Image (spheres, rainbow, N blue to C red):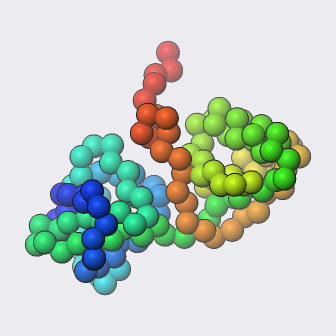
Amino acid sequence: MLEIHERLTDSASHHATLTLPFDSRQKSRLRATLDDGTEIGLFLPRGTVLRHGDCLRATDGRVISVQAATETVSTVSATDLLQLTRAAYHLGNRHVPLQIGSGWLRYRHDHVLDEMVEHLGLQVTVESATFEPEAGAYGGGHHHHHD
């Protein structure tokens, strides 16, 4: 099995691709398969979150490009920015990883969250798309404690 211990700081020409959904891209230890069928073991520093386009170096020197897989997501679009901001607030209050675009929000599909957003007066579209949520104010992850 090919091992990967290093994320490169700049994009480089790559030899292979690794397509993963967001849940897998936020794991620092992972057994996976490159798109060409090669088995790999990912051993990155704890807390590493891989983003679409990141490059990794394998122990044999190969450079691997990370690709975000398409997954089932809920996308909320609105022209009323107050409504959209309200939805972002309520989703964030539930610690939902959220991708934010100009006039839209996206989260992993969840019918309960869809109903909540619809009750706020917004329409939800369930679709297949890549998911790249915000990293967070401190670089990502959920770090505070609930006492």
Q: Position of residue 87 (x, y in %)?
A: 75, 41
Residue 20 in sight here: no
Q: Residue at x 76, y 63 (%)?
A: 125
Q: Position of residue 30 (x, y in %)?
A: 29, 58
Above or below residue 132? Residue 98 is: above
* Residue at the top extreme of this rendering: 147
Left or right relative to 106: residue 17: left
Q: Position of residue 129 (x, y in %)?
A: 60, 68
Q: Residue at x 45, y 55 (%)?
A: 23
Number of on-image labels: 0
Q: Residue at x 43, y 29 (%)?
A: 143
Q: Position of residue 78 (x, y in %)?
A: 82, 53
Above or below residue 14? Residue 91 is: above
| Observer-nearest of 60 and 101 | 101
Query: Which quarter of the figure has residue 8?
Result: bottom left
Left or right relative to 59: residue 137: right
| Observer-nearest of 98 and 78 | 78
* Residue at the bottom extreme of this rendering: 36
Above or below residue 12? Residue 36 is: below
Left or right relative to 61: residue 89: right
Query: Which quarter of the figure has residue 55?
Result: bottom left
Left or right relative to 123: residue 143: left
Q: Quadrant of the N terminus?
A: bottom left
Q: Residue at x 27, y 77 (%)?
A: 14
Residue 54 in sight here: yes
